[in-house]
Each structure stands twice: as structure tokens, then as C-alpha cells.
Image: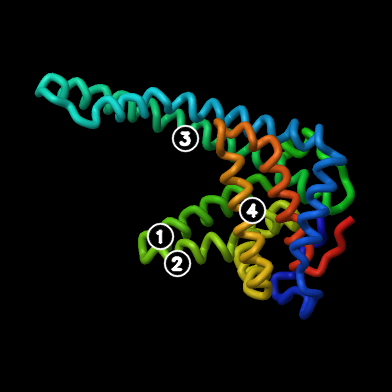
């Protein structure tokens, strides 16, 4: 774990301009040299995503079949089916979301460790170090994003953009929610150009990963995480090994 910056510290006063190309080439090289380890970690997430999509498929089928009921009997049958399907579907969605959340932490930790010259390990997935802080930050991140979208949509996107590095500060430096929010917002505001490119590229990669029942997540998730971890180090003026 990197040494935390004192709460009142404003971070490095200046650092070289972040290089997106350097982060991309490093992420690709690291993924190639540690392919089996990263794919194994991402496989857990991919399996959960596939199971999640299969679990909610019956509810999707019910909704499609009930788009245009023709008789009172069909309306009643659809109402019952949708009610029952919604309960089970939402329950499964919550369960798989929590599992995916926990599994993704392992990939994040491995990406952070890679910037320190350490290979990926399944131990990253099972350690509870900073788990509580990560959970609290995630809840705050989701809550602030929802409030932003409800308020005027644009604030929601701003929250997603400026706070996206929060998980790295939590898992790498052990920051609490407030400190991670401030650190992420500060880093992104000081690197708006590279930060925007990072956001667009990582989003595109993750969208591609969501295709074909999430199978491509095996590669896109670790690559995106490695890319963002390198940019995170650059934004903080830290050495990448």
C-alpha cells in the first residue's frame, strides 16, 4: 500500500503532464506478461455477469410476452407473472451485483499492485483490507451520482467523472470516503484533458466487455483497470514500476 497523503496536504504541487499513450502501452504490456493471472481474476467477474444475465432472462421474456395483452385474462395473468418475476428478478440482481462488486475488488487491487511491480494473485480477492471503506465509498459514489441525475442529469455525469478515482485512493492509500472524494476530484480537476480521454477510453472498453454475456470482460476489465491504475499514478506524480 502506498503511504497516505496527510489530510491537509494538497498533493504534489506540480507533476509532468499525464501521458495516455504511455498508460495504454504499459497496460497492454502488463496484461500480456501476466495474462493468466489477470484473466483468472476477471473470470470470476465474468462468470457472475453471465449468471446475472441468465437469471434475469425469464423476467425479460415475461415483459416481452406481456407487452400487448389482448384480453382481461391475459392482463391478469401478466400482472401475476410480472409481480412474481419482479421479486425474484430483483432479488437475484441484488445478489449478483454484490458478488460482482466483491469480485471486482480483486481486479482493482491487482491493477494497483501491478504499478508497484507485483504480479496478480487470488489473495487480492479475499483480503478484507480497506473493504469497509471501499463499501462506504461505493455507496456514497452511487448515492451522489443518483442525486446528480435526479437533480439535472449533468451533475450526475460530473460526479461519475470527478470521483471515478476514489476506489484507487481507498484501496491503495486507505483513504476514508471524504478524503477519497476530495483526492479524486482534485486529481481529475488538475488533469481534465487526460482525465476525459481516460474516461472515454475506459468506458468504451468496458462497453465492449459487456457484449456476448460479458465474456469479453476476461480481457477488457483487467486492461481497463491497469490503464486507469497507471493514469492514477501519473496524476499523483508517483513512480510506476
Pointers 4 and 1 in contact (C-beta within 8 Å): no
Camera-side mark, 4 or 1: 4
- In the rendered structure, which disc, 4 or 3, sits on the residue that comes first in sequence? 3
Label 3 SS: helix
Q: Which residue is mark 1?
A: 149
- In the rendered structure, which disc, 3 or 2, sits on the residue that comes first in sequence? 3
Q: How far from the left and from the top, in percent, is residue 93?
A: 46, 33
Q: Which residue is mark 4?
A: 202
Q: How far from the left and from the top, in percent, is residue 148?
A: 42, 63
Q: Which residue is mark 2?
A: 155
Camera-side mark, 4 or 3: 4
In the image: residue 207, left or right of residue 64: right
Q: How far from the left and from the top, in percent, is residue 37?
A: 80, 34
Q: Which residue is mark 3?
A: 94
In the image: residue 148, left or right of residue 134: left
Measured Cα–Cα span from mark 1 to mark 3 = 21 Å
Label 2 SS: helix
Dividing the picture into quadrants, the one containing residue 165 is: bottom right
Rendered image: mark on residue 97: none
Give the crowd class for mark 2: few <14, some 14-19, many >=20 residues within 10 Å.
Answer: some
Pointers 1 and 2 in contact (C-beta within 8 Å): yes
Camera-side mark, 2 or 4: 4
Amino acid at each position: 500500500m502506498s503511504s497516505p497523503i496527510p489530510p491537509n496536504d494538497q498533493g504534489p504541487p506540480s507533476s509532468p503532464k499525464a501521458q495516455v499513450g504511455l498508460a495504454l502501452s504499459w497496460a497492454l504490456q502488463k496484461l500480456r506478461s501476466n495474462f493468466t493471472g489477470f484473466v483468472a481474476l476477471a473470470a470470476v467477474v465474468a462468470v457472475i455477469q453471465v449468471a446475472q444475465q441468465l437469471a434475469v432472462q425469464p423476467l425479460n421474456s415475461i415483459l416481452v410476452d406481456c407487452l400487448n395483452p389482448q384480453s382481461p385474462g391475459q392482463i391478469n395473468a401478466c400482472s401475476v407473472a410480472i409481480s412474481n418475476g419482479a421479486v425474484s428478478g430483483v432479488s437475484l440482481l441484488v445478489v449478483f451485483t454484490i458478488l460482482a462488486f466483491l469480485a471486482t475488488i480483486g481486479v482493482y487491487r491487482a491493477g494497483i499492485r501491478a504499478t508497484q511491480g507485483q504480479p496478480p494473485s487470488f489473495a487480492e480477492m479475499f483480503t478484507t483490507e480497506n473493504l469497509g471503506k471501499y463499501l462506504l465509498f461505493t455507496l456514497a459514489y452511487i448515492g451522489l451520482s443518483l442525486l446528480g441525475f435526479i437533480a439535472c442529469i449533468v451533475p450526475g455525469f460530473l460526479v461519475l467523472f470527478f470521483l471515478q478515482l476514489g476506489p484507487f485512493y481507498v484501496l491503495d492509500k486507505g483513504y476514508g470516503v471524504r478524503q477519497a472524494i476530495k483526492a479524486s476530484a482534485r486529481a481529475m480537476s488538475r488533469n481534465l484533458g487526460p482525465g476525459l480521454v481516460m474516461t472515454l477510453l475506459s468506458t468504451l472498453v468496458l462497453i465492449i466487455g459487456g457484449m456476448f454475456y460479458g465474456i469479453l470482460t476476461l480481457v477488457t476489465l483487467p486492461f481497463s483497470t491497469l490503464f486507469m491504475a497507471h493514469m492514477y499514478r501519473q496524476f499523483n506524480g508517483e513512480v510506476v514500476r
